[in-house]
Amino acid sequence: MWKRFLDILYPPFCIGCGDDGLWACNNCIKGMKFLIEQVCPLCRHEETGGYFCDGCKLKSEVYLTGLWASVRYRESEIESRLIHTLKYDFVTDTVPTVCEIMVNALPKIDVDNFVLSFVPLHIKRQRWRGFNQAQLLAEYIGNALDIEVVDLLERTSFAKPQMELGKDERVANVRGAFQVKWIDENCQKQDFGKGTRRGQMPKKVILIDDVATTLSTLNECARVLKEAGVEEVFGFVFARGA
């Protein structure tokens, strides 16, 4: 009822063309730069299904197993406007549109072998925004694909947003910024999802975020998860930046 009331007062409109009714109309969605092939996340030269190519896997700072992305991030186009409307205009009604695009781009995998998780926000930023957009995306995708969503990580340092920094600064900005949530509010080890014993980490994790550019944030999260016992960490994002 509350949503219907808001739709009457502030009816949704396509943020691409301005038509009434949807936050992204079908014509504007068709005009997005979809990533048909999933390439090596680092060099982007070889179609690998999202895995790192043999050369890039040898780099010492690579902790992600691979990356899947749905669209190319384009400034001032509908791809970036959808994310901006969600994160900075706080319009969570855009989540279904973003997630449906992500689900359609996900390669065929045995989802029973994975749990979903998400990149955490620092508590200060989450209180300011009122939600964690990556968590909302993960929960919607989890429901759509029947994959368990597990809250694995927390952010321990409050730093500048990554979008304000250069490539080298981004790596330093997130180094040591995350840790595994081993202890719950009852001071007992958490149950980390199906196929695990209490206190045992899952073996395969798909880590959800909205945009990936330099991979600094996802890679640092993967480093922490692997040190805690996770064997494979795939990043899964709506948009891949330049």
Image (cartoon, grey):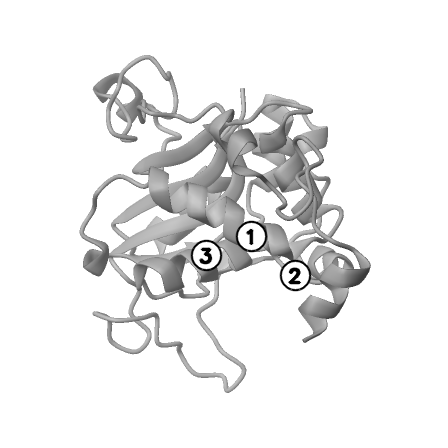
The disc labelled 3 sits on which kind of residue? Answer: Ala
Q: Which residue is mark 3?
A: 138
Q: Please tell me the numbered disc located at residue 131.
A: 2
- Label 2 crowd (10 A; few <14 / some 14-19 / many >=20): some
What percent of the width, then of the height, locates residue 133? 59, 53
Q: Quadrant of residue 85?
A: top right
Residue 221 higher or lower than 124, as above or below: above
Q: Which residue is mark 1?
A: 95
Q: Earlier in the sequence, mark 1 or mark 3?
A: 1
Instruction: Please say whether residue 61 is visible from this viewpoint.
Output: yes
Real-space Cα distance between discs 1 and 2? 12 Å
Q: How many marks?
A: 3
Q: Residues within 10 Å of mark 1 (few under 14, many from 20)?
A: many
Q: Nearer the viewer, residue 115 or 32?
A: 32
Q: Is residue 194 left or right of residue 28?
A: left
Image quadrant containing the C terminus: top right
Looking at the rendered structure, the secondary structure element under dot 3 is: helix
Which of the two residues, 106 or 209, is positioned nearer the viewer here? 106
Q: CA distance from mark 1 to mark 3?
A: 10 Å
Type of amino acid under label 1: Val
Instruction: Check the image and name the residue furthest to the right.
Output: 9
Q: Is disc 2 placed on a helix, strand or loop?
A: loop
Tell me the SS state at disc 1: helix
Q: Residues within 10 Å of mark 3 (few under 14, many from 20)?
A: many
